[in-house]
């Protein structure tokens, strides 16, 4: 008599992940008392924190009841106090795609990231939001691009400076190219980051003050920040060409790191002169 192999049990990745994270939580710290034979929260306690029924949550751990909605997954992520990486994994195992990025956080950058910026003494580097607000910079950027520390936060927005500040415009080697790049990346990145309200306010402001911005915005171009080259006209050392690259910041989908590497030996010498001479006490406003 032939023995038939049993079909493999289908893995319940979502249920296993939910249970694992539930058992890691500290019930007492979260306000739940009572004697417990096992660590972590009970199913009904997670359901309470997520504002869903205990039955529905139990089914999710058991691999029953179909796929949860993104709203339910976000509620579970909050209830289980998941990190951004864990939240992304929750969505992937539950419905097969990543969650939408959370709205931009505006508390600035970490000390660790600032120390990374400061470790590049002759290479300008900035940290920008999806709407091109500069929230971090190093001394080289302050000397070569703009004295961000001396500017009020609202005036650290690159779109405003490129379209509304004559001095910033005059410093661009190719203003039209820079402006189009900014508008196209602004459109793409604010949509990705869920910054629609902030973007709408900025679009209304700039459209009312700059016919050129309004024209470019209606063209509906989109582009990733990526990498490229740009030339600026610096009042102290003359023209400098940079090769710029953008980098994602882990755990901060609302931010991008921009590094402006001098393109050639002559450009590097100009940056060394600028960062090491008395000119260092005279930051310029040339941007991006």
Image (spheres, rainbow, N blue to C red):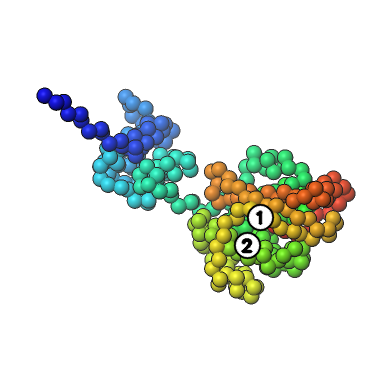
Residue 228 marker = 1
Q: Quadrant of the N terminus?
A: top left
In the image, taking residue 229 as reference, residue 1 lies left or right, namely left
**Residue 54 seen in the current view:** no
Q: Residues within 10 Å of mark 1 (few under 14, many from 20)?
A: few
Q: Tell me if residue 117 comes above or below residue 42 in the rendering.
A: below
Residue 126, percent from left and from top: 68, 50
Tags 1 and 2 touching, CB below 8 Å: yes
Cα distance between the residues tagged 1 and 2: 10 Å
**Residue 70 seen in the current view:** yes
In the image, taking residue 111 as reference, residue 234 lies left or right, namely right
1 or 2: tag closer to the N-terminus: 2
Q: Which residue is mark 2?
A: 181
Q: Which residue is at a point 64% across and 42% down the rendered structure image?
A: 113
Residue 190, percent from left and from top: 54, 59
* Closer-to-camera residue (187/155): 187
The quarter holding residue 55 reads top left
Q: Residues within 10 Å of mark 2 (few under 14, many from 20)?
A: some
* Closer-to-camera residue (127/180): 180
Q: Which residue is at a point 60% across and 47% down the rendered structure image?
A: 247
Residue 48, percent from left and from top: 33, 42
């Amino acid at each position: 008599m032939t023995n038939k192999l049993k079909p493999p049990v289908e893995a319940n990745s979502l249920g296993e992940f939910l249970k694992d994270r539930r058992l890691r939580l500290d019930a007492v710290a979260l306000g739940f008392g009572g004697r417990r034979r096992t660590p972590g929260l009970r199913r009904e306690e997670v359901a309470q924190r997520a504002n869903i029924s205990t039955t529905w949550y139990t089914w999710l751990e058991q691999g029953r009841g179909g796929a949860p909605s993104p709203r339910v997954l976000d509620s579970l992520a909050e209830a289980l106090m998941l990190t951004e990486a864990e939240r992304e994994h929750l969505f992937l195992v539950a419905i097969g795609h990543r969650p939408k990025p959370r709205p931009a956080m505006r508390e600035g950058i970490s000390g660790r990231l600032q120390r990374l910026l400061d470790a590049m003494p002759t290479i300008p580097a900035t940290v920008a939001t999806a709407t091109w607000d500069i929230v971090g910079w190093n001394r080289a950027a302050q000397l070569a691009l703009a004295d961000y520390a001396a500017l009020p936060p609202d005036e650290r927005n690159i779109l405003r400076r490129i379209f509304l500040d004559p001095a910033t415009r005059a410093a661009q080697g190719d203003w039209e190219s820079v402006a189009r790049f900014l508008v196209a990346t602004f459109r793409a990145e604010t949509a990705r980051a869920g910054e629609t309200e902030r973007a709408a306010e900025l679009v209304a402001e700039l459209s009312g003050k700059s016919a050129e911005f309004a024209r470019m915005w209606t063209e509906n171009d989109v582009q990733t920040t990526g990498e490229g080259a740009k030339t600026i006209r610096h009042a102290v050392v003359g023209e400098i060409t940079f090769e710029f690259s953008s980098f994602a910041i882990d755990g901060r989908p609302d931010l991008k790191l921009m590094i402006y590497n001098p393109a050639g030996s002559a450009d590097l010498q100009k940056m060394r002169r600028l960062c090491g001479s008395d000119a260092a006490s005279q930051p310029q406003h040339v941007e991006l």
